[in-house]
Image (tube, rainbow, N blue to C red):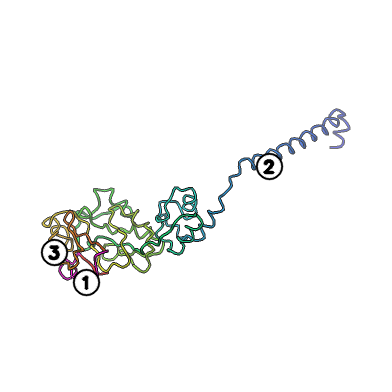
Amino acid sequence: MMNLLLDNPSLSQTLPIVLAIVAVLAVVFAVLIVLVSKLCFVHEDERIPAISEHLAGANCGGCGYAGCADYAKALVEGKADLGACGATSNEGKEQIAKILGIPFSAAEETFAVVKCAGGINAKNKFDYVGNKGCDAQIAYLGGAKVCPEGCLGDGTCAAACSEGGIKVIDGVAVIDKVLCQSCGACVRKCPKNLIEIIPKKAVVFVACSTKCRGKDVMGACSVGCIGCGLCAKNCPQGAITMVNNLPVIDYDKCNGCKTCVAKCSRKTIKEI
């Protein structure tokens, strides 16, 4: 290398200039990088991590956001409602309300139930063979069940539950009240809209969602509601009304006497 420089005096004079230019460019680019990083830096509101600490941390998506951090950001920006997170306790929500400077009133504790008891008791139109999951099955002729509202029992809700609180038993999804955090993830995932959030004080629930009339129900499911109305007629508290051939329970009136359970000939109203 030295011989090359000695044999080429012009090259030995040019090299220091080139090195100096490279050094200057390196300094210029370093300064530009620092300036750009400062100009493009997005300051995170300090309330976001503070709120995240009080959330349940389930990252279930039941609130409609990608995870707890995304939900916390939406709360700070005023785009989300504090009541959208069913998994966070009232104590946690109270602390979040203080951080946000908004009023807070404790919500009634709730849990989810599957409004269907069909499964092996409900007839099939065909034997489904295909991809796993109710969302995949329903894409083929609405799913295998004769009942248009029947649980497909393919476990899409169970896969969505971060607490492992849902099992498919005898072809129908069953939710464990103790494990359920009422996050709502299963509600969003069920393609038949069969999962409902009800008060934790509830003693009974209607395990059916069909709107069909009695004769059609009897031909499709042995435990489906036939809309006879005996539960509503015999409820001492007047807590049950018939809507679209289905009993609807007013849990503010229901005292848990279970008269409806005893009167239901189809055993569609279940004791929790």
The residue that disc 1 covers is 257
Which amino acid type corresponds to the residue marked 2 in the rendered image? Val
Q: On the image, which quarter does residue 204 sit in?
A: bottom left
Query: Does label 1 or label 3 sit earlier along the sequence?
Result: 3
Distance (Cα) linking label 3 and label 2: 76 Å
Q: Which mark is residue 209?
A: none
In the image, residue 114 lies in the stretch drawn in magenta: no
Residue 255 vertical position relative to residue 212 in the rendered view, above or below: below
Is there any visible trace of residue 119 in the rendered image? no
**In this rendering, position of residue 192 left or right of residue 21:** left
Residue mark closest to the camera, 3 vs 2: 3
- Mark toward the start of the polypeptide (3 vs 2): 2
Q: Amino acid at mark 1?
A: Cys
| Residue that badge 2 annotates | 34
* Residue 203 visible within the image: yes
| Rendered location of residue 191, percent (x, y) | 30, 52
What's the CA distance linking mark 2 and mark 1? 71 Å
Q: In percent of the image, x 83 and y 30: which residue is there?
A: 14
Q: Is residue 213 left or right of residue 99?
A: left
The numbered dot on residue 233 is: 3
Residue 129, image x and y in percent?
Answer: 28, 54
Boundaries of the magenta span: 252-268
Rate crowding at label 1 as few (under 14), some (14 to 19) or many (20 or more) other CA atoms within 10 Å: few
Structural distance between the alpha carbons of marks 1 and 3: 14 Å
